[in-house]
Amino acid sequence: MVLSKDESLIYDIKISTVGPGRVSGHGVVQELTGMDLAMKLHYLKTVYYFRSPAFEGLTIINIKETLFNWTCHAFVPCGRLRRADSGRPYIKCNDCGVRLIEARCKMSLDEWLESKDDSRHKLLVTNQVLGPDLPFSPLVLMQLTKFACGGTSVGISWAHVLGDAFSAAGFLNLWGQATRQQFPAKPLSMAHTNNEGHNPKIPLQDLLAIKRVGPLGDTWATPNDTKIETYSFYLSWPELTRLQSKICGDKNHQQIPPFESICTVVWQCIAKVKHGSEVNMVTICKRESKIPFEGIITNKAQSIKVVKTNASVEESSLMELGLLLMNQGVDERRDIEEAMESDGGFPDFLIYGANLTFVDLQDTPLYDLDIRGNTPVYVSCAIDNVGDEGVVLVFPTRKDQTDGLTMSIALPQNHIPELKLLLKREWSLS
């Protein structure tokens, strides 16, 4: 269940399933919204790295006990998918639990993190997808990997049909509280469906943020022949400030925010890499609400905006592109949901990578996972099963006791070497 690259480093793999320690949510069925089903082919992969004190003295039995207790309050993610008589998927709650994978690594935590190879993170989180036996496929899988030094990584595979990255982080952060015997006042829940009639204003085929694939049946993954490679780099806040200044020039009255500044630079560089194959349309995914996680997992809180330009991205000024990203995005979220509902929730779509997609995870509380007073020293984040146009994630990072942002770029493998050279030569980013 672990990716095969250099798998000699990872050994002693054990697999089990952990469910609620008592009956909770028995007989409860969770209907899925149109937006949940639009996201069903995507998977969030997050790896949290901890120093040895976090799990020191904890046996696997102790860890499972925390999960027994926590999943009593999180019976929706413990569920399994079923299909109604109409064929529409839903979740049967509290049905089998969370899959748990235990493993060991021959390297120390510091040796592992010193590597510049982004593919290494994939060894610490399973690549399993939903299906073909949906009733037996877990929605959440956790991999605990013990390093030679005593450090531990917690790898989470989260089916996006449950909710966005903010929801996934909120779910795991509540497990961290459970390790300290702190539990939420009410169980974790999903956003409600809207059962009103739907008359979509825009036909599915005219929506720009999605790419129709399949039909895929009960195997929720696309047979992608293009090898996608991931490349990431770190920016401290002083470096981000210099980047913003370079983009804005002498226009001090106009400021491009950090996320849009990064998107602008990467967008233009990718356009140059593609050599005449214009990248004139991108998708921006961003959580609109600043409200903290309140126990509701959802796919409705993240906007899905399409930005188009008729001008050459290569020749446009960075300021022009930045203002375009800030002000000209058209949110297709509601149109996607209405179109999905009108079609019975059956179509199979890609959203991430249908266009070149930028995902803003700056406000995702990745470093709030607290295990007995210990927070992660590093967090890796990725989205799996994406389209060929590529995905860029922007998420918070701690490095050398300072905060900054990591840009994780997933593109077809043949584009990565030239993009690396371009970012380093023109922007000193590596």
Image (tube, helix red, strand yellow):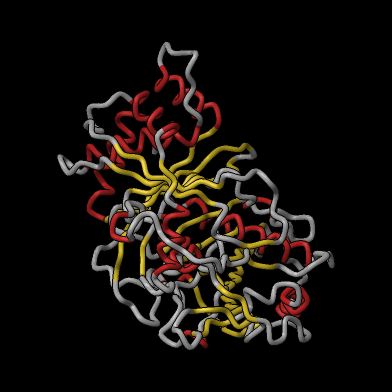
Farthest residue to the left: give it: 276
Which residue does the image show at 65% across and 54% down from the upper left? 376
Could you say which quadrant of the image residue 93 lies in? bottom right
Which residue does the image show at 51% across and 69% down from the upper left? 159
235 relative position to 179: left or right:
left
Q: Position of residue 414 (x, y in %)?
A: 22, 53
Could you say which quadrant of the image residue 12 lies in? bottom right
Could you say which quadrant of the image residue 133 lies in? bottom left
Farthest residue to the top: give it: 250
Above or below, comparing residue 202 to residue 171 in the picture: above
In front: 278, or 394? 278
In front: 323, or 98? 323
Q: Position of residue 307 (x, y in %)?
A: 36, 40
Above or below, comparing residue 57 to residue 205 in the picture: below
In front: 339, or 23? 339
Asked whether the viewer can see residue 31, the reply is yes
Which residue does the image show at 68% across and 46% down from the upper left? 291
Q: Position of residue 29 (x, y in %)?
A: 63, 81
Which residue does the image show at 29% across and 53% down from the upper left? 389
